[in-house]
């Protein structure tokens, strides 16, 4: 009987809700206008800045710096390969039975290689001495006709030295940034250890402090907690 009453009441409640909300009277245009007028209420602001910790920001800066340095290393490797190609071409000229003819034939290739080399130079940013006169750059006249094998060879050797030197500088910078990143992580670990509510405890040392020998050593300075306690009995309790 009770179950029938509950079922009947539930059916009546559902019918009441159905009568109250008439879906046939719902205007789709009103829903569309409501969503359009209140669209900002349903959007997630993608421009909310994410709050990062100081550790996260520092590590992000270090990783960005290392990434830029690795790109510069890659560009220096490309320059080194170009220098090798120019050297190969100059060897072809000197080994030729008609050096002048060969030089004229390979001149466009040499000029293009030097242009490619020069285009990579702006992508390599180093803290150089402003008074320095040597740069990783070929003179435009060097690749023009007529080619001078001796001048090209001397220029290539000079550029090889500069590329090697710049590569060493950037590798040193990368190691310095790595060291800073490791120190940053170490400082953060030390900071967290100091802020921990529970400290690491050497239970072995603490237990040895309560040995019989240790208690006997300080027995004369032990303050009795009970006014009427016998000193001998108090000492026995400690030992």
Image (tube, rainbow, N blue to C red):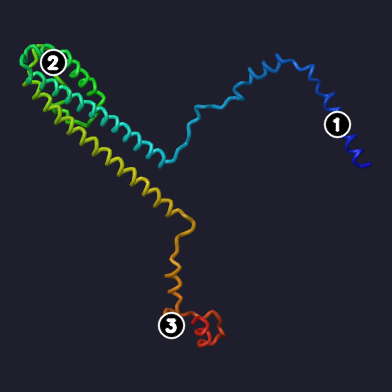
Indicate which disc, 2 or 1, sits on the residue closer to the N terminus.
1
Q: Is residue 136 above or below residue 55?
A: above
Q: Identify residue for label 3.
A: 216
Measured as percent of width and height from the top left, residue 78 is found at 23, 26
Q: Secondary structure at mark 2?
A: helix
Measured as percent of width and height from the top left, residue 100 is found at 6, 13
Query: Cα distance, mark 1 to mark 3?
Result: 84 Å
Q: Residue at x 30, y 40 (%)?
A: 177
Q: Which mark is residue 13?
A: 1
Query: Cα distance, mark 3 to mark 2?
Result: 94 Å
Measured as percent of width and height from the top left, residue 168 is found at 20, 36
Q: Is residue 100 above or below residue 211?
A: above
Pointer 3: residues within 10 angstroms few (<14), some, or many (20+)? some
Measured as percent of width and height from the top left, residue 80 is found at 19, 28
Pointer 2: residues within 10 angstroms few (<14), some, or many (20+)? many
Q: Identify residue for label 2.
A: 143
Query: Cα distance, mark 2 to mark 1?
Result: 94 Å
Q: Secondary structure at mark 3?
A: helix
Which mark is nearer the camera, 2 or 1?
Answer: 2
Q: Nearer the viewer, residue 161 or 29?
A: 161
Indicate which disc, 3 or 2, sits on the residue closer to the N terminus.
2
Q: Is residue 176 above or below residue 219?
A: above
Q: Residue at x 54, y 79 (%)?
A: 225
């Amino acid at each position: 009987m009770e179950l029938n009453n509950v079922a009947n009441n539930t059916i009546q409640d559902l019918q009441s809700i159905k009568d109250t909300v008439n879906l046939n009277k719902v205007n789709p245009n009103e829903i569309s206008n409501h969503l359009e007028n209140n669209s900002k209420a349903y959007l997630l602001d993608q421009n909310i800045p994410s709050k990062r910790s100081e550790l996260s920001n520092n590590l992000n800066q270090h990783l960005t710096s290392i990434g830029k340095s690795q790109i510069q290393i890659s560009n220096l490797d490309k320059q080194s390969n170009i220098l090798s190609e120019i050297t190969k071409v100059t060897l072809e000229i000197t080994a030729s039975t008609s050096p002048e003819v060969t030089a004229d034939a390979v001149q466009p290739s040499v000029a293009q290689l030097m242009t490619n080399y020069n285009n990579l130079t702006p992508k390599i940013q180093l803290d150089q001495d402003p008074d320095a006169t040597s740069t990783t750059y070929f003179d435009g006249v060097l690749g023009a006709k007529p080619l001078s094998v001796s001048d090209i060879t001397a220029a290539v050797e000079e550029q090889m030295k500069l590329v090697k030197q710049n590569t060493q500088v950037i590798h040193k910078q990368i190691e310095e940034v790595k060291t800073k990143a490791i120190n940053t992580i170490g400082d953060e670990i030390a900071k967290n250890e100091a802020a921990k509510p529970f400290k690491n405890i050497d239970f072995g040392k603490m237990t040895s402090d309560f040995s019989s020998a240790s208690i006997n050593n300080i027995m004369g300075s032990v303050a009795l907690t009970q006014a009427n306690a016998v000193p001998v009995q108090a000492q026995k309790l400690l030992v």
